[in-house]
Image (cartoon, rainbow, N blue to C red):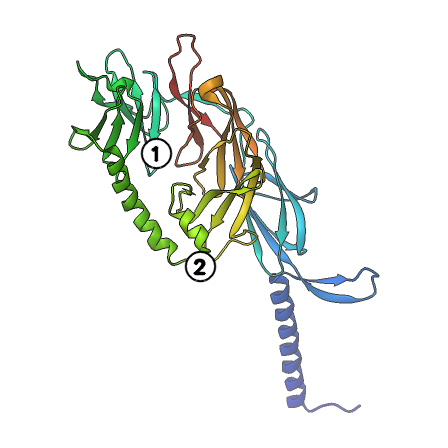
């Protein structure tokens, strides 16, 4: 029998091993990249097809994730080898309202999803017990100013709503400007924060205005509140104009973005605006994030309502991907419904449906609670309460 010389056999073995390693590396690389072997519909032709991934997070964690009705994983995790196209994603956790959304999966890309899960039994806890009226949130969403006719310290109060301090026993509401013999600050009509959060513009019961310096504890009468508001607006809008100038957006949206019609998200990269469309009023969100998250749109509709129907009051949720809506007329009916909704109009979930004294709702910076003004006593005293979302 003919045998190859030993050097030739060693060379062939080395080459063969190298080819096997290259082939295995290629297979591993393609597999890791989401490529899978797939037969066509008739089952005769085999081809290598590219797939996508879905990264699913939930707040709180520990929820089950279903794709098209099949349990796939638990949050927080990544689902590999998902065929490109539309799929129904569902996130379920005991004690929380189920979350579902039709998602679009793209070849060789990861679609990131964060599901905000709302407790089916939200906790209602008092934030104040001295009475509260006309609350106003600071620009950074970290403090609330409100009026109180407390028997010992009537006047204007401020409470921190930053992380870790949001409860009656841990937060420290404090009176910052007490009623005097001549001026009842506790009966003021409205409070407005300055952009730097160092001052409060107070509209008194008689219609006069005063400017209160929180640091200096000084009060001065203001004869031209509109001029002061305009000055504050100029300082805020200058920063926004500088930001907008860098974006490639239509002139119409540029004008809206720097107007009071735009409601900016906490991340300052998105804003909500309203657009008339016949008899409908369309609520839309413009997203300037770069790069844009997979599956998101730059300028997308959220929902539409008939112009003749009562419009909800809307604020941004802390993650800048959800909106909080207050529906109803609390100031008239003393009742309202609060929802949370994703900026693409999906997953409108009820948070609260009960007595409500104001349509103004405030979101805690950590996103775990919202703050409402309500009352559960026949005396009529209203207080600030937190509603736990999880």
Secondary structure beneath disc 2? loop
Nearer to us in this view, 19 or 57: 57
User: How many tags in the picture?
Assistant: 2
Residue 358 occupies quadrant: top left
Residue 324, percent from left and from top: 48, 34
Q: Residue at x 26, y 40 (%)?
A: 196
Q: Indicate left or right for 248 with 81 as reference.
A: left
Between discs 2 and 1, the one toward the N terminus: 1
Q: Residues within 10 Å of mark 2 (few under 14, many from 20)?
A: few
Question: Which mark is in front, 2 or 1?
Answer: 2
Residue 256, percent from left and from top: 42, 47
Q: Is residue 204 above or below residue 100?
A: above
Q: Is residue 91 above or below residue 292?
A: above
Q: Which residue is mark 2?
A: 248
Outermost residue, front side:
278
Q: Which residue is mark 1?
A: 162
Residue 32 occupies quadrant: bottom right
Residue 68 occupies quadrant: top right
CB-based contact (under 8 Å), mark 2 and mark 1:
no
Residue 37 marker: none
Q: Is residue 238 above or below residue 90?
A: below
Q: Residue at x 45, y 51 (%)?
A: 252
Nearer to us in this view, 339 or 75: 339
Q: Residues within 10 Å of mark 1 (few under 14, many from 20)?
A: some
Residue 312, percent from left and from top: 50, 31
Q: Residue at x 67, y 84 (%)?
A: 12
Q: Quadrant of the N terminus?
A: bottom right
Q: Residue at x 83, y 65 (%)?
A: 44
């Amino acid at each position: 029998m003919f045998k190859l010389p030993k050097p030739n056999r060693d060379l062939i073995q080395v080459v063969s091993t190298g080819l096997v390693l290259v082939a295995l590396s290629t297979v591993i690389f393609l597999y890791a990249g989401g490529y899978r072997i797939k037969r066509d519909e008739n089952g005769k032709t085999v081809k290598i097809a590219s797939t996508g991934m879905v990264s699913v997070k939930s707040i709180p964690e520990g929820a089950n994730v279903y794709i098209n009705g099949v349990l796939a994983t638990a949050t927080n995790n990544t689902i590999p080898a998902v065929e490109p196209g539309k799929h129904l994603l569902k996130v379920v956790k005991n004690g929380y309202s189920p979350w579902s959304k039709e998602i679009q999966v793209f070849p060789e890309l990861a679609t990131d999803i964060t599901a905000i899960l709302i407790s089916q039994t939200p906790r209602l806890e008092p934030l104040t017990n001295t009475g509260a009226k006309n609350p106003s949130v600071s620009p950074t969403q970290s403090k609330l100013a409100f009026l109180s006719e407390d028997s010992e310290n009537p006047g204007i109060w401020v409470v921190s709503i930053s992380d870790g301090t949001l409860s009656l026993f841990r937060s420290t509401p404090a009176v910052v400007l007490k009623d005097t013999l001549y001026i009842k600050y506790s009966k003021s009509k409205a409070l407005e924060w300055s952009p730097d959060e160092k001052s409060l513009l107070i509209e008194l019961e008689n219609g006069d205005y005063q400017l209160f310096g929180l640091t200096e504890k000084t009060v001065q009468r203001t004869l031209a509140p509109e001029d002061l508001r305009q000055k504050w607006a100029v300082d805020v809008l200058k920063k926004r104009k500088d930001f907008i100038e860098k974006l490639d957006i239509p002139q119409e949206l540029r004008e809206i973005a720097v107007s009071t019609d735009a409601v900016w998200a906490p991340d300052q990269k998105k804003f909500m605006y309203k657009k008339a469309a016949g008899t409908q009023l369309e609520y839309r969100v413009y997203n300037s994030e770069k790069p844009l998250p997979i599956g998101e749109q730059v300028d997308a509709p959220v929902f539409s309502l008939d112009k003749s129907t009562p419009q909800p009051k809307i604020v941004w949720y802390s993650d800048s991907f959800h909106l909080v809506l207050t529906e109803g007329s609390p100031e008239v009916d003393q009742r309202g419904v609060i929802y949370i909704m994703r900026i693409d109009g999906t997953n409108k979930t009820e948070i609260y449906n009960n007595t409500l004294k104001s349509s103004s709702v405030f979101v805690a910076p950590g996103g775990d609670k919202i703050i409402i003004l309500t009352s559960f006593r026949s005396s009529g005293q209203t207080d600030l309460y937190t509603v736990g979302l999880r």
